Image: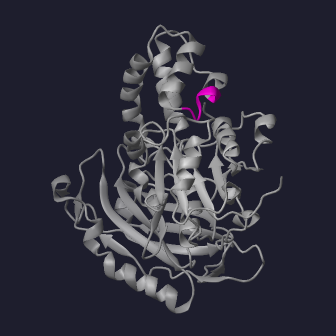
Amino acid sequence: MPPQPVTHVIFDLDGLLLDTEVQYTEAHNRLLKKYGKQLSWDVKSKMMGRTQNEAYQILINEMELPMTVEQVKTEMDGYLEELFPRSSLMPGAHRLITHFYNTSVPMALCSGSNKRFYELKTKRHKRTFDLLQHCVFVPSDPDVTRGKPDPQCFQVCSQRFSPSPKCPSAVLVFEDSPNGVEAALRAGMQVAMVPDCRVSMEERNKATLCLDSLLYFKPELFGLPPFMDYANDHKEKQVALMKNLFAMLTWHQRLVPLGSAVIAVLSFAFFIGAGAARQEIADQHLQRHKIEDFEIPESAIIQLPYAVFPEPNCEYSVHAGGPSGPEVSVASIGDLLYHKWKCHTATKSQKLYCIAVHNCSVGNDRLTYTIIDSNGCTTEPSIVPEITYTGDLEAGLLSHAFSLGFQPPTLAFKCKIKLLIKENGVCSRTTCPDRSKSWF
């Protein structure tokens, strides 16, 4: 049956909005290692979407473990409490939630996770999850006694919307597991499935819609407002890149001791939008973000002589198409842009330093979303690639102009530069994980 118009949305959590399946698999394999075993996809797929007790009983039965559910739970809880705070948003999750929030589409969460683990998993992403209208946690909800694939959790979640949907088919459920898809379909709802690559075609075909990523979801297929961050109708959407408008340098001729080795923090931003709205956003950022926001804590610095560690000069520019393209001040959403950061120091000290780009974010006066994290690694690899370094003091980022669903698409794209002192001639930048690898 083709997609039908919907008015409400319910999200699953693990593997759909948050990339927690990596943490679950690591924890399971830690537990299984002492028995000389490893979690297989067949067993994992049976556990996905189940309540915690149900999943652990499946693990015990399938892996023939000499443990009780309570013993498994105690050991797994210890591993998971350590691992869950590392959880990352899945590509497109923030974009989709923000879009629905900005277009007043009622959203809720229905998860087999307990509330305590939910808070650990979402600790780094609270602003995103605070946009949801309500959450149902199967293990602790008084009105839910059965987990997926039973439809009860989705039925309860739907009933708590205010106003409530006119019929079950007016609800779209986003799921990644076959058990979750079955539960939503039994509840009479439509399902957009974003499955693991190992899920069979038979299971995929049960969903109303099957996608490789949330990034490929088109709201208009279900009668919802379309995204405005990419121009599908070929209309020109002009955006301005106000380079160097927001540039601040904290420089006090002092240094964090070796190990961190940050000697300065430089922040640049450009603003996407049009006319007065763009200028308003720029003014708000200039007013709110004072230089002290980027200062290094007094307890972590030591004094350095200026003659030995002179102040660097750093610049930021945006080029059309690539690093050798012309500098641009205006572009259209979807245009290919190259962001370039470059620093210069006195000749004698040129070999002392290197730079690291980090904490890049997009946002407006209401919301901010991190695109490049504090380690300098991308959080949305399908949209923004990793930073590339063409030298110790030069970095670049090749990406299309985007707005990630912010409405209206007027926002600031902001990055910081850390100036590092090299140790034994080596720049100690973080090595970002290979996100092309597949995990259980």
Q: State whether residue 386 appears in this view.
A: no
Looking at the image, residue 118 sits to the left or right of residue 387; the answer is left
Q: Name the colour scheme.
A: one colour
* Image-quadrant location for residue 168: bottom right
328 up-or-down from 440: above or below: below
Please give the range of residues in magenta: 45-50
Using the rendered image of the protein, determine whether residue 111 is visible from the camera's viewpoint: yes
Question: Who's the residue at 48% across and 59% down the image?
Answer: 132
- In the picture as drawn, the residue positioned furthest to the right comes out as 1
Q: Is residue 206 left or right of residue 148?
A: right
Q: Is residue 180 left or right of residue 433?
A: right
At x 44%, y 83%, the residue is 282
32 to 308, vertically: above or below: above
Q: Where's residue 34, x and y in %?
A: 46, 11
Q: Residue at x 40, y 19 (%)?
A: 70
Q: Is residue 29 above or below residue 306?
A: above
**Who's the residue at 60% across and 58% down the image?**
9
| Nearer-the-camera pick, 73 or 256 | 73
Q: Position of residue 37 (x, y in %)?
A: 55, 13
Quadrant containing the C terminus is top right
Q: Where's residue 121, x and y in %?
A: 43, 44
Toward the viewer: 391 or 414? 414
Q: Quadrant of residue 240?
A: bottom right
Tally the numbered discs. Answer: 0
370 inside magenta stretch: no
- Identify whether 277 is placed above or below 272: below
Measured from the top left, where is residue 408 in percent x and y? 56, 79
